[in-house]
Amino acid sequence: MSSKTLFQISRAAYVALLLLMTAWFGNQGLTGQYSLIFSLLWILPLLAPLKGILTGQPYTYAWASFIICLYMLHGLTLLYVTETALVFAICEVALLSLLMITLPFYARIRGRELGLGLKKRKK
């Protein structure tokens, strides 16, 4: 798969996840199930790599995978325990699974295209 295809898939899935989480936790905050501060704390980590994700910086794609792990734990836990939010949990886990695959692969392929990587130690 080319880096351009991975970039488009990753970017679309990331924006979809951001919109899904904003809508879900925003609604939870407005209805009073969660406080607005707690809802905002769930959305803030997704905003940290947003600029790098949209511009296609390989380094950002590499470390954004660590942030995705937090949301994967939430999604899998919700998938296991919920009966009422099952559709949300399935959508969240599906988007996160897609991101867990495409983010590191894009970072690797695009990094090689740009000649980035760890420098070899001279003997």
Image (spheres, helix red, strand yellow):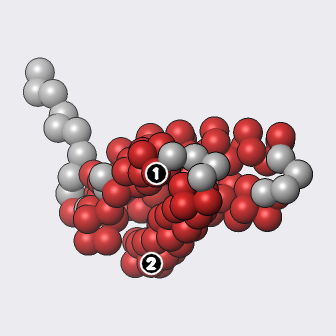
Q: Answer with the quarter of the image where residue 115 lies.
A: bottom left
The amino acid marked with disc number 1 is Leu
Number of residue marks: 2
Confirm or deny contact between disc 2 and disc 1 (CB under 8 A).
Answer: no
**Quarter of the image that includes the C terminus:** top left
Q: Nearer the viewer, mark 2 or mark 1?
A: 1
Q: Residues within 10 Å of mark 1 (few under 14, many from 20)?
A: some
- Return the residue at label 1: 36
Name the outermost residue toward the top: 123
Q: Where 103 falls versus 34 (above or below)?
A: below
Disc 1 element:
helix
Q: Is residue 110 visible?
A: no
**96 to the left or right of 116:** right
Mark 2–mark 1 distance (CA, rounded to whole Å): 32 Å
- The label on residue 8 is 2
Q: Residues within 10 Å of mark 2 (few under 14, many from 20)?
A: some
Disc 2 element:
helix
90 and 58: which is toward the camera: 90
The amino acid marked with disc number 2 is Gln
